[in-house]
Image (cartoon, rainbow, N blue to C red):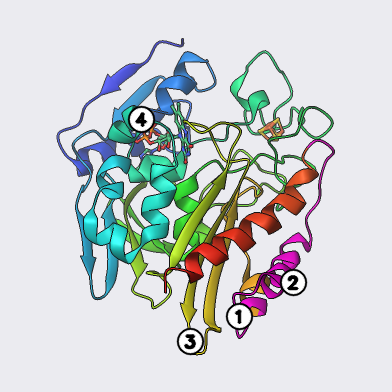
Amino acid sequence: MHPFALERPRDLPGALALRAQSGRNDVAAEYIAGGTDMVQLLQENVRRPDRLVSLGGLLDKRIDVSPQGLRLGAGATMAEVAAHPALAAEFPVIAEALLNSASPQVRNQATMGGNLLQRTRCPYFRDTGYSACNKRIPGSGCSAIRGENRWHAVLGGSDDCIAVHPSDLAVALVALDAVVHIQGSGRERNVALAQFHRLPRSTPHIEAELRPGEVVAAITVPASPVARHSHYLKVRDRASFEFAVVSAAVALEMQDDGRIRQARVAVGGVGTKPWRLPNVEAAMTGSSLQREGLRKAAALAAQGAQGRGHNDFKIELMQRAIVRAAEAAGARS
Ligand SMILES: Cc1cc2nc3c(=O)[nH]c(=O)nc-3n(C[C@H](O)[C@H](O)[C@H](O)COP(=O)(O)OP(=O)(O)OC[C@H]3O[C@@H](n4cnc5c(N)ncnc54)[C@H](O)[C@@H]3O)c2cc1C
Ligand code: SF4
């Protein structure tokens, strides 16, 4: 492991100032929150900062459910958010995504901000024995495109990177139009979660719309009639702490006649960022919960999808996951 100095500032402005001193250079300094991802990356030599700036105890941990919607402080842990009774009742897709993530030990430690900014599980990114990984070493190539790519993306990939964004939480949040509240030295701004994570294009090492030194301070989700009737379905290789092979977050508002008034659909395990599917949502609107209609709508998820060999099966599997998640969400009305 590369040696580093651990900075423990007293307050958030102190942390922002310390990190800002390093400018764009994230080799010089990086943030650490719960540390569940960062410590692994340090141990594996994937990240080699000279200085780690701890956000421990400095971030807002509040969880507020109100008639306006939901607000999650970036320091709230995955366990705290999943166990919040009002959140589980009003936004079940979020609680389910969290309870299907990681292990209880990780959820006790990991934060909302860290969850959105966790790095990909692409094995070539995580293993420095592979020299070609554009995300780890810009310009070095991509070992996955012609290598073992069962875990990789079929949506949003480029010739430079096809790594999947690993967060389950982000898939549920993007379905519900979440907004990320960002804080930097002397400035605050908001970015829709749908725009927060970047497509890899030719710069896969730049993953989020964060400027040097900025932190994720909070996440909000607007109140919506769809949120209560929502479900997160995760398909994984084993039942306990495993990342998604494919997942689907579906939220529905139903009419009295059993038809769908409005739908929100996002998928995970298949996209280079949390992937919203507006074409599927439009096709579900006005349809009933009959499997045939849902299946037709879900088929539109395949538009633009590109398999790379080992991951071809995900194109069919994501459609099935969407149908099953929609049936479960509809049953909640
Ligand atoms: C065994 C295991 C299984 C897992 N399984 C799953 C799973 O099934 N699904 C899933 O979604 N996740 C899974 N994870 C990942 C886990 O959810 C993340 O490790 C965790 O959410 C990261 O949060 P953290 O607070 O520990 O972040 P850290 O490890 O502290 O940081 C992660 C990154 O975020 C940055 N960062 C942290 N907070 C902020 C902030 N507020 N502002 C700006 N930058 C910040 C850090 O600089 C770092 O780059 C698993 C992890 C492990 C170890
Ligand atoms: S898919 Fe992305 S993260 Fe994986 S090897 Fe290719 S460039 Fe690296």
Label 4, label 3: how many angstroms apart (C-alpha)? 40 Å
Residue type pointed to by label 3 = Gln
Residue closer to the observer: 223 or 58: 223
Image point 31% across, 66% down: which residue?
A: 90
- Dot 2 or dot 1, earlier in sequence: 1
- For label 4, being within 8 Å of ligand 1 is answered yes
Secondary structure of the residue carrying tag 4 is helix
Task: Give the x, y percent position of residue 154.
Answer: 74, 48
On whether residue 284 falls in the magenta region, the answer is yes
Query: Which numbered mark, 4 or 3, is in the foreground of this view?
Result: 3
Residue type pointed to by label 1 = Ser
| Pointer 4 residue | 106
Give the magenta range.
283-310
Query: Which numbered mark, 4 or 2, is in the foreground of this view?
Result: 2
Label 3, label 2: how many angstroms apart (C-alpha)? 20 Å
Label 2, label 1: how many angstroms apart (C-alpha)? 12 Å
Secondary structure of the residue carrying tag 3 is loop
- Dot 4 or dot 3, earlier in sequence: 4
- Dot 4 or dot 2, earlier in sequence: 4
- Relative to 331, does residue 165 appear above or below in the rendering? above
| Pointer 1 residue | 288
Secondary structure of the residue carrying tag 1 is loop
Label 1, label 4: how many angstroms apart (C-alpha)? 39 Å
> Is residue 162 at all visible to an observer of this figure?
yes
Residue type pointed to by label 4 = Val
- Dot 1 or dot 3, earlier in sequence: 3
| Pointer 3 residue | 255
Q: Is the C terminus in the top left, top right, bottom left or bottom right quadrant?
A: bottom left
Residue type pointed to by label 2 = Lys
| Pointer 2 residue | 296
